[in-house]
Amino acid sequence: EARWELGRTFALLGQLPEAVTEFTELLKHHPNDVGALVQLALAEKAIGRLEQAQDWLERALALDPDSSVINLYVGELLYNTVRLVVGTVIACGLIGLVAAWLTERSNLPWPALWRILLVAPIAVPSFINGFTWISLSGRFEGFAGAVMIMTLSHFTFVYLPVAAAFRGLDPAYEETSRALGNGPWRTFWLITL
């Protein structure tokens, strides 16, 4: 009981190697403690030892496949996935919209070149983009790095239809809005979007 609490305290304080040590010691005395196995897997994962984390989690699943403790782990994975999707969709929307407006509605130099460069990420699979960015620097790991890599891999899916819509929009509508006294932002929100 004391080792369990000590291990959880170390984990909550971010002292993950100490948490791993405590949960490992606990498992020497209680090898079938599913909660300790899951906590050890989470600590190992946070340190970056993914193979060990997977081993501990598989051992926990073998002991109790219907465990509510393991369902908490699934909940964490679902939460992280939803966060990643929401963050990526928002970032892709913003970057795709701005890129489309710059190439289709502004005086950006060399718009044809920019159109080609902005579509280029669609030709590279996202797992290769992820591997490349992480290989360049460890700073691209974690949640923010995942959102950045996913955004840079997928913003083109927003850019292409928005650019096509901007290209098909008659500029006379925007000019009329401006002539009626609307500023550039109001025209953008009311007419362009």
Image (tube, helix red, strand yellow):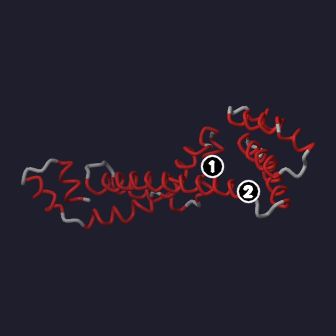
Indicate left or right for 138 with 52 as reference. Answer: left
Callout 2: helix, strand or loop?
helix
In the image, what residue occupies the spot 42% across and 58% down?
Answer: 116
Q: Position of residue 129 (x, y in %)?
A: 59, 53
Picture coordinates of residue 166 (x, y %)? 28, 62
What's the residue at 59%, 52% (across, down)? 80
> Which residue is labeled 2 in the image?
70
In the displayed structure, 58 sits above or below 46; it is below
* Residue 97 in the figure: left or right of residue 153: left
Q: Secondary structure at mark 1?
A: helix
Residue annotated with mark 1? 132
The spot of residue 142 in percent (x, y) is 61, 44
Camera-side residue of 130 and 185: 185
The residue most toward the front is: 1
Residue 146 numbered tag: none
Where does residue 132 sit, x and y in percent of width and height?
Answer: 63, 49
The amino acid pointed to by label 2 is Ile
| Screen quadrant of the N terminus | top right
Q: For the residue carrying disc 1, how many other residues have a C-alpha within 10 Å: few (<14), some (14-19), or many (20+)?
A: few
Marks counted in the figure total: 2
Left or right: where 29 falls relative to 86: right
Q: Is residue 150 left or right of residue 94?
A: right
Residue extending furthest left? 180
Q: Are marks 1 and 2 in contact (CB under 8 Å)?
A: no
Q: Nearer the viewer, mark 1 or mark 2?
A: 2
Q: Residue at x 18, y 61 (%)?
A: 171
